Amino acid sequence: MQAARDFPKIIWTLWLQGWEAAPEVAQASLASWRGRNPGWRVVPLDRDDLAHYLPDEVIAPILGSSAPPEAISDRIRLELLHLYGGVWVDATTICARPLDDWLPDRMGSGFFAFKKPAPDRPLASWFLAAEKGSYLAEHWCRAVRAYWQGRVERDHYFWLHNLFAALLHKDPSFEQFWQTVPDLPAAHSFHFGPANTRLSAQPTQADLNDLRDPSAPVFKLTYRHPKLCGPDSLMDLICRYGRQVPVTAGPPKRRILVAWYGSFKQFGTIGDLLSLQAVVSHLVGCGHEVLHATGAEIEIAGASRVDWETVDLRGIDGAIFVCGPILKTHPTTGALFARLATLPFSGIGVSLMPEGHMNHLQPFDRAFARQGGAEPFGDVAITGPQAVATPPPDRPKRPVIGLALRGRQPEYGLDICLWRETADLAQKIIDAVTADGGSVITIDNHLVHSGKTPDEIEASYSQCDLVVTSRFHGAVTALRHDVPFIAIDQIKGGAKVYDLLAPLGWRHVYRIDEAEDEILVRAALALIEKPDRVRLLAARQSAVAEANRTLAHLDRWIGSLEQAGWSQTT
């Protein structure tokens, strides 16, 4: 069995028409998930709540469609798991055993669903669990988005399951990940469809025994039973079972300010933005009130954009700085760090220079640093949200090479930043790969200087067959789109690029002072011919797991904060 992985302790459930009007089975379902899962955040959503959690470009087309409610719900669950991770439960499920007792050990692949509710369906969709960045959840969500492009109606009641089955058939990696999900059957003695007459009958002794010691952790009921189930029915008994555990308080909610390099209008890269979005969406999903200090007009669902220089810090419980190198000589961050130092202050996904370095600075009370701290933590950009866009056209037969170079990095010292040598080596690789034809996309990760939108920058990576990069987030963005890459650390002796990417297990990460032209050219040609998907996806899984571990540590730090006493009325 694979080791358990960290994933968000959030339970999503939905009754579109509003919970006040929900039937008894839905009320009992909600009570069961709340009562049996102390320490988890349970989020009961209705139609009006969705705009808080999903971007307008995602939710408006879903709610504006003429599809039936269950198809709308199918789409919403995949979008929530993609953006936040956590657990989705239908409002007709009953929690029989606490999630902490059985689910973590089954999340080794970063995803879980009960299997084979029927011979023609690989999984049940009434209970789904996913870490942020889960390969299965991400690719399933992409397939759902593509399916509804230009469509107003589903073609089959089980369209969602059919998409999953199609991915199993055409994507060997998808099938491989699914095979690692432990087998736990969806069908069991307390799995009921609308026509099951047992729900309206009196409970048998076997039913009573199963309630005393449930053989399955989740019961599946229905609200469409054709016959009213009376007070002596099995349905009534199961609903009362769902309500029998008292509801306890959920995790504490805090008011958090998140800053990043994009807090300054002329700064920020696609990697910085993805990290910001990953952290802010995680905090929103966990129920916190989130303010993000962003200079440009970038909106994130559920959070408020503020100016770091003018925002009132009274009543803010803690501040976070997301992503990037922390430099003593940086021209703009000093004033921001000084202002936020009046709050409990953490850094996540940051790189700290070694003590004694001319640029060493550690302004945080708690640093979840990817580099330079007492313990390394994973970068979180890999779990940032995927752009909502039309699927890219088929790639041309000739290879498309992405070139994403960092340029000068004086913060390390000009004598050890071999950026010209790195650019020369990258050009030799490209010349060799495109000798018989092909094209090159030069990718600038900078949000301002590139002249492109964030979605356009990401789309550049997705169009490539190979990425050659000296940027750490150039490699990470390639990983997000399952594109093989060659990463060259242009700092003599190695720095961020080598130190952070090499532990992921991807073989094509090099230090410039040790890189040999012939070896890298040969590697590039081999990756074009055979992309080495197995190692690439293993590296992706490792990066995703480390990102989720980092977010779990951030949760514990936030849980330790004292509440500052802020309220909407003050």
Image: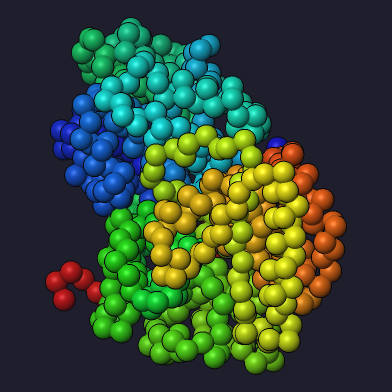
Q: Name the residue nearer the viewer: 512 or 225.
A: 512
Quadrant of image for the C terminus: bottom left
The location of residue 156, given as percent across then percent down, is: 36, 15
The location of residue 489, given as percent across then percent down, is: 71, 69
Q: Name the residue nearer the viewer: 359 or 486.
A: 486
Does residue 56 show up?
A: yes
* Residue 265, picture quadrant: bottom left
* Residue 526, picture quadrant: top right
Quadrant of image for the N terminus: top right
Q: Name the residue nearer the viewer: 265 or 7.
A: 265
Q: Among all residues in the image, which is located at the extreme front?
A: 436
The location of residue 226, given as percent across then percent down, is: 23, 10
Q: Where 34 falls versus 124 (above or below)? A: below
Q: Where 448 falls versus 105 (above or below)? A: below
Q: Where 175 falls versus 539 (above or below)? A: above
The residue at the point 46 percent across, 20 percent down is 162
The location of residue 287, given as percent across then percent down, is: 34, 57
* Residue 318, picture quadrant: bottom left
The residue at the point 77 percent across, 77 percent down is 492
Q: Name the residue nearer the viewer: 295 or 369.
A: 295
- 160 horizontally vs 103: left or right: left
The residue at the point 68 percent across, 86 percent down is 414
The residue at the point 67 percent across, 71 percent down is 496
- 495 horizontally vs 304: left or right: right
